[in-house]
Amino acid sequence: MTQETEQRITVRGVDHYYEWISEGLSPAPHSEACAASHSENSLPKPVMVFIHGWGGSARYWRKTAKELSQNFDCLLYDLRGFGRSKLPQTPVEVTYELEEYALDLAALLDALNIKRVYLHSHSMGASVAAFFIDLFPERVEKAILACNGIFEYDEKAFSAFHKFGKYVVQFRYPWFLKIPLADRLFMARFLHRPIEKDAQRDFLEDFILADYEAALGTIYTSVSQKAVEVMPQKFAQFKVPTLLISGEKDIIIPAAMGRQAAALNENISYVEIPKTAHFPMLEDAPTYLQEVQKFLQDNSL
């Protein structure tokens, strides 16, 4: 039986939401109570941490995590300023640089007494994962990066993107959720195949409720000259077995960018899932899970 537990914890001055999805474990995996309840022959399973992308939350990872929960204790959390990890009214001394989000994850794992993990990440979350792998390679068993890659710097294009992004972040209103088909229109750019209605609504709700400073700050750090210069170095330095998954029809982060990133390092395996766009784990879950399981079970990596 799959167990789901929702909890909160303070990480680097910010109240963070996290949840466990695991099969057959109660109380929450890796908690003190759980550790006390396990015998030497019944240890917790390896931990897989899921990192969501920009404007989202852990919610869209739940179905994937449930499918993997037989072999992993799945830890899902909302990045600082997104989902249910709201920023405090009193400012904290952390920035929205991607490496800061990697340090958030390290602090979360430390607080939960988790030493080593499998990473499962998406979009901006995959960039956070790349920084985490670079900073803490000894803490990562294997990594899965979905819909990420290498950009080329274009000052005018980036400037226009930032200007448009600021406008989009600034003008978000809860009443958008009441407009018929608003969720479908919002997700149209991200999808090639339809996904469930509830998932579409969750995406729109998460986007609307994301904290302004975090949503805008990560636009500037994710799509920047620094990211263009640094990310290829991160990919090239990976010593951890990594699977990079692209959606064939992705127009947010085109598959060509994923192929370029994978070509930088023999430790990176590359898979392109046909007829999917920016959310292959939802658009074609069976194929996505098949590729993930194949990677996880390959002991040669």
Image (spheres, rainbow, N blue to C red):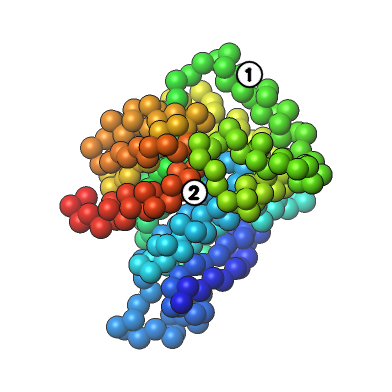
Q: Amino acid at mark 2?
A: Leu
Q: CA distance from mark 1 to mark 2?
A: 30 Å
Q: Is residue 258 above or below residue 301?
A: above
The percent coordinates of residue 230 (x first, y second) are 43, 30
The percent coordinates of residue 70 (x first, y second) are 38, 69
The percent coordinates of residue 3 (x first, y second) are 51, 74
Residue at the spot 49% in from the left edge and 49% down from the top edge: 282
Q: Amino acid at mark 1?
A: Ala
Which residue of the protein is positioned furthest toward the top in this rendering? 156
Query: Disc count in the image?
Result: 2
Left or right relative to 117: residue 207: right
Alpha-carbon neighbours of circle 2 within 10 Å: few (<14), some, or many (≥20)?
many
Residue at the spot 54% in from the left edge and 70% down from the top edge: 4
Q: Nearer the viewer, residue 194 or 82?
A: 194
* Mark 1, residue position: 160
Alpha-carbon neighbours of circle 1 within 10 Å: few (<14), some, or many (≥20)?
few
Label whose residue precedes the other's in the sequence (1 or 2): 1
Which residue of the protein is positioned furthest toward the left in this rendering? 300
Q: Secondary structure at mark 2?
A: helix
* Mark 2, residue position: 282
Residue at the spot 49% in from the left edge and 59% down from the top edge: 63
Q: Nearer the viewer, residue 174 or 275?
A: 275
Residue 259, label in figure: none
The percent coordinates of residue 183 (x first, y second) are 68, 43
Q: Secondary structure at mark 1?
A: helix
Left or right relative to 282: residue 238: left
Residue 124 seen in the current view: no
Name the mark nearer the viewer: 1 or 2.
Answer: 2
